Amino acid sequence: MNSFESILATITPTSGPTREILDPATGDVVGSAPIHTVDDLDRAVAAAASAQPAWAALGHAARSETLLRAADAIDAAAEGLAELLSREQGKPLNGPNARFEVGGASAWLRTAAGTPLDAQTVVDDGTTHAVMSYRPIGVVGAIGPWNWPMMITIWQIAPALRMGNSVVVKPSEYTPLSVLALVAVINEVLPAGLVTVVSGDREVGARLSSHPDIGKVMFTGSTATGKAIIRSSADTVKRLTLELGGNDAGIVLPDADPTAIAEGLFWGAFINTGQTCAALKRLYVHDDIYDEVCTALTAVAETMPMGVGIDEQNVLGPLQNQAQFDIVAGLVEAAKASGARVLLGGNPVADQPGYFYPTTLIADIDNDNPLVAEEQFGPALPIIRYSTVDEAIAMANSVEVGLGGSVWSSDVAKAREVAARLETGTVWINAHGAVHPMIPFGGSKQSGYGLEFGVEGLKALGVPQVING
Ligand code: NAD
């Protein structure tokens, strides 16, 4: 089951209602997804609940060995998975896109499998002996977005499985095939019922987040949906990890070298054509080097080809759906109407197939402009001028979300001082958005709570238990 065609055949429903999934770059049919219901969800939860005890009883070593074989299965199917992902999500095969995402899924699974989490003796003083360890939660629900559907599904399910849980996955309505395919591949290795994908709508997501037999929800998506999940999970006191929206700021200090940082700034903002939670979405540049940074960034952006994802030369793709296209187009139009200066793009071609929005850079824009204040989630970067570092930090911190941020400078010590003043879960120095399977990742403020990755990420998928005595 390694080619695009064979993977698609495996996940194409043979009965029940289906709907067609269209390629956002061409409008062509990619395949058919099942329309699962709340009853299907209940059946998946029951299967997960019955598969979980035997999986937990295997112990860490045997589970890890099985998960490493699941990562091997992803690697063996990588090219077919990447093609499906590219056709359904729109992201190119090449660049930090579809192949990169499938490779990341495998790498994160391997790291979750191989990371030890030993019991911790917290007090042992001769009179008291207390040890803390982590028991499985039971059935975990995983609800994901459409921007990095395979990678984020693995971020949710790998630590859950490693810690002895079973999982029911509810993918985005926009990208169900990618998640169905990924799970079909790992299910070649995993016990039956342990991981099930329920390809339903918001109603299915709402049921999952209130289901009495689900102990934890891993959610990645918008802040608005995260708040709905907090409410609907309250009656069953579910544990939650919420990775929500972001509006990350990057601050370029006056001592930065514009040419040296231009490519890093570009990919920080435009990875996955801007449809990334922790992408650079507001760029603050000191007055002294503002024009040089605008010129250097425009020069890099002009060289990056955008087009149909399976054409190897492209590194930028379409927006994934019409709604996202409309959001980006509306924000850029409002910015133009306010008098902001278009350095590049801002002029989508009408009547072409696909949701292509050109790479757009907007200069001389106010901090309260909607393109700055709201999450654009697309290829349109506002560049805001500042004159003091205090002013830049105040503007960076002026939003309700706080996922990531970055500081760009030739003086790393000075950049770290500025970084410590940003109200975000992560701050990168001279980079933006790079994630690592051993480095904890999570939001502050309304970007959510809970950490993913590394040891902290494993702990989040267990219930701490202290044995005192
Ligand atoms: P979304 O919130 O619209 O949808 C996410 C998922 O939630 C979908 O599967 C959807 O069906 C489901 N859902 C919708 N209503 C629900 C409800 N009431 N109960 C339970 N589930 C429900 O998000 P999206 O548009 O798919 O993704 C884009 C957003 O995700 C952006 O804001 C982006 O910043 C954010 N995001 C965050 C991270 C992160 O790590 N913090 C990563 C990727 C994306």
Image: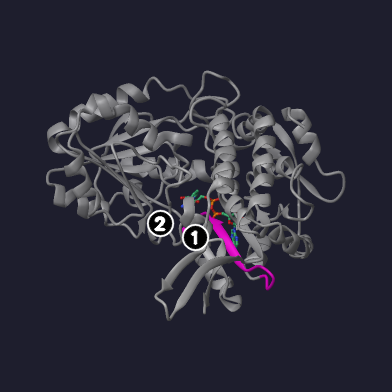
Q: Earlier in the sequence, mark 1 or mark 2?
A: 1
For residue 117, say whether it is visible.
yes
Residues drawn in magenta: 211-223
Dot 1 and dot 2 residues touching (CB under 8 Å): yes
Q: Residue 376, labelled with which disc?
A: none
Is 214 one of the magenta-colored residues? yes
Look at mark 2 in the image and give the residue it sits on.
443
Instruction: Specify the amino acid type for callout 1.
Output: Leu
Q: Viewer-proximal residue, 190 or 61? A: 61
Location of residue 195 with respect to 180 vertically, above or below: below
Displayed quadrant of residue 65: top right
Rendering coords of residue 428 (x, y %): 32, 43
Q: Is residue 186 left or right of residue 399?
A: right
Look at mark 1 in the image and give the residue it sits on.
242
Location of residue 1 with respect to 441 vertically, above or below: above
Rendering coords of residue 246 (x, y %): 40, 52
Location of residue 57 with respect to 213 vertically, above or below: above
Q: Secondary structure at mark 2?
A: loop
